[in-house]
Amino acid sequence: MSVRDSWGVRLTRAGRGMPVVRRTRAVRRTRAARLALAVPLLAVALAGCGIRATEVPTDFGPAPSRVPCALTGPDITTQSSRGILVQVFLLCSSQLAPVDRTVRIEAGPAETDRVRAAQALLDELSEPPSDAEKQANYTTGVPQGLTVSGPNSGDPDDTLRLSTPPARLPSYARAQIICTFSDSEAASDDGTVTLGGPGTDVPRRYECTEEVRSRPGTETPPSTEAEGT
């Protein structure tokens, strides 16, 4: 036997004459309450497992931006009027990055052109970055006071001898010098750079590779012993 209550829900009787009420709305409310209770319990369980619970959707805000290693292009006409436009490699984001500079090279015998060009580049590399370069996160690892001279007797004609042996220079400085020289008049005809120290050590031919430009702090420039004249 069944009747309907004031909600219009059907009432039935079962066992010992006790009524069993099937209220659709009441069941839904009970399920919602159980779900609401289960959510914080699940979050606690996840936290105990080392899993960080978050609400969905989550707004993390804009992705962090990186300052690019780039400068506004120089006024080549104005720069050229003050000297020769050259390119040197500075440090930015732990990599080598080319920067345009202007240098003045004093006149002299043709056979010393390579040495004078190399010294002008060394001076630029050891100069502190300009304000614009600092704002773009450029730095340099080349120490000030570094000098260069020509070959010793018996050295290849394209040898450049630094006042500090290349092997004793900081890795960043050595990479800056080699890559800057390799893209200039200081380089040998094949694009390598022949360097030695102030003594009688045998000079070596160094290469500036993509790996050296990308990882100057850890990548050693490839080199081979230079044969004498």
Image (cartoon, grey):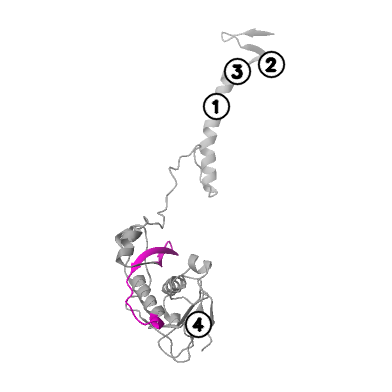
Quarter occupied by residue 186: bottom left
> Residue 129 appears at what percent x and percent y?
33, 65
Q: Which label's residue is closer to the chain start, 3 or 2?
A: 2
Residue 53 on image: x %, y %: 51, 43
Q: Name the residue under label 2.
A: 14
C-alpha span from label 4 to label 2: 101 Å
Gap in Å between the C-alphas at discs 1 and 4?
Answer: 79 Å
Q: Is 17 situated above or below 104?
A: above
Q: Could you say whether the residue bearing mark 1 is in a helix, strand or loop? A: helix
Q: Which type of secondary structure does the marked residue at label 3 adopt?
A: helix
Q: In this view, does 158 lie above or below 87?
A: below
Count of numbered badges drawn on the protein: 4
* Residue where numbered disc 4 is placed: 204
Q: How far apart are marks 1 and 2 (CA)?
A: 27 Å
Which residue has dot 1 on it? 32
Kind of residue at disc 3? Thr
Disc 1 vs disc 3: Cβ atoms closer than 8 Å? no
Which amino acid type is marked by label 1? Ala
Viewer-side label of 3, 4: 4
Q: Which of marks 1 and 3 is nearer the N terminus?
A: 3
| Residue 21 on the magenta span | no
